[in-house]
Image (spheres, rainbow, N blue to C red):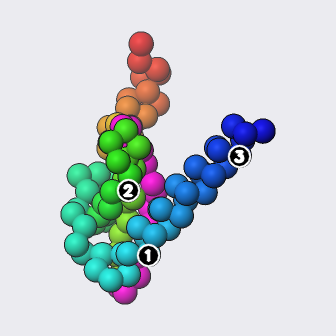
């Protein structure tokens, strides 16, 4: 039971941290750099980092008119989205790569 409680507490803390970061975009979303994966989204996508060391996440978002639209939250250890999409295209055309 303690493990479940700790896990739920950590998850809630993580979600609150993400929400706080996203809320900070209201003030000045253009402070964040354009993400190298922007081309994969078909529009200018910016990145806001959340977390420390091994627990770092990339919050990918677009600015449309006066609104911020969150595309996704990705762990920073994952391959870039462009690489993943490229891999999927290759696998879809030629079958899985081994």
Residue 30 lies in the magenta-colored region: no
> Which residue is at the front of the view, 46 or 10?
10
Dot 2 or dot 1: first in sequence order is 1
Residue drawn 45% across the image and 54% down it: 73
Q: Are marks 3 and 2 in contact (CB under 8 Å)?
A: no
| Camera-nearest label, 3 or 1 | 3
Up-down relation of residue 16 to residue 25 (above or below): above
Residue drawn 47% across the image and 21% down it: 95
Quadrant in the picture for the N terminus:
top right
Quarter of the image holding residue 88? top left
| Camera-nearest label, 3 or 2 | 3
Start-end of magenta stretch = 65-78
Q: Main SS of the magenta segment?
A: strand
Residue under circle 1? 23
- Secondary structure of the residue carrying tag 3 is helix
For disc 1, the neighbor class at 10 Å (few under 14, some 14 to 19, many from 20) is few
Q: Give the residue furthest to the right.
A: 1
- What's the CA distance linking mark 3 and mark 1? 27 Å
């Amino acid at each position: 039971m303690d493990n479940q409680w700790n896990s739920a507490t950590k998850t809630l803390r993580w979600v609150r941290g993400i929400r706080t970061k996203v809320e900070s975009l209201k003030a000045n979303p253009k402070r964040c750099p354009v993400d190298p994966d922007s081309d994969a989204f078909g529009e200018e996508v910016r990145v806001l980092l959340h977390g420390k060391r091994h627990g770092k996440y990339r919050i990918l978002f677009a600015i449309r008119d006066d609104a911020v639209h969150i595309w996704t939250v990705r762990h920073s250890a994952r391959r870039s989205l462009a690489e993943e999409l490229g891999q999927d295209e290759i696998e879809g055309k030629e079958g899985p790569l081994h």
